[in-house]
């Protein structure tokens, strides 16, 4: 990754329209026909990836390591929501983001997210080896 200080202030955006299959009812995690909170996490991760994408070296990617989320309100099926993610800190291979989701002007969720930069091939190889080792135990 390029110098961590260059990441500070980088902003990414993501948006989605909430479909019936995105609801808590459809995912079996509640009985309300509102957007499942897991989609808020997906939207914020997508915005964070958009913010950091141009700073990654070929073969690098990032993965979520920590998330603190405050869900402030619910959204109905059909709602158009958008997320922003701003890089607020960068230390070595770890980046921190402040993320928000809005429906129009209504603030839906806020989060603090940490992502670790990894080399894709070696990370996947290590993860596969660890999974094989745990199956053999």
Image: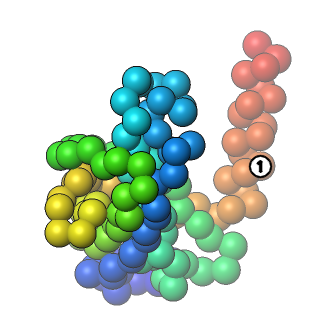
- x and y percentages locating residue 87 in the rendered image: 30, 72
On screen, residue 55 above or below 75: below
**Residue drawn at point x = 34 percent, y = 86 percent:** 6
On the image, numbered disc 1 is attached to which residue? 125
Closer to us: 50 or 1: 50
Residue 3 visible in the picture? yes
Dot 1 crowding, Cα within 10 Å, few <14, some 14–19, many 20+? few
Residue 115 visible in the picture? no
On screen, residue 84 above or below 26: below
**Residue drawn at point x = 51 percent, y = 85 percent:** 54
Screen quadrant of the C terminus: top right
Q: Furthest-top residue in view?
A: 137
- x and y percentages locating residue 65 in the rendered image: 43, 47
**Residue drawn at point x = 62 percent, y = 70 percent:** 60
**Residue drawn at point x = 26 percent, y = 81 percent:** 9
Closer to us: 21 or 102: 21
- x and y percentages locating residue 94 in the rendered image: 40, 61
Q: Is residue 80 left or right of residue 46?
A: left
């Amino acid at each position: 990754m390029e110098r961590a200080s260059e990441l500070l202030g980088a902003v990414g955006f993501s948006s989605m329209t909430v479909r019936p299959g995105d609801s808590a009812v459809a995912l079996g995690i509640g009985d309300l026909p509102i957007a499942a909170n897991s989609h808020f996490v997906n939207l914020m991760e997508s915005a964070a990836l958009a913010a950091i994408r141009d700073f990654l070296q070929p073969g690098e990617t990032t993965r979520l390591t920590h998330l603190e989320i405050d869900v402030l309100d619910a959204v109905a099926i059909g709602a158009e929501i958008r997320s922003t993610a701003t890089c607020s800190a960068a230390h070595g291979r770890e980046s921190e983001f402040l993320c928000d989701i809005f429906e129009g002007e209504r603030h839906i969720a806020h989060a603090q997210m940490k992502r670790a930069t990894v080399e894709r091939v070696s990370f996947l190889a290590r993860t596969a080896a660890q999974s094989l080792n745990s199956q053999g135990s």
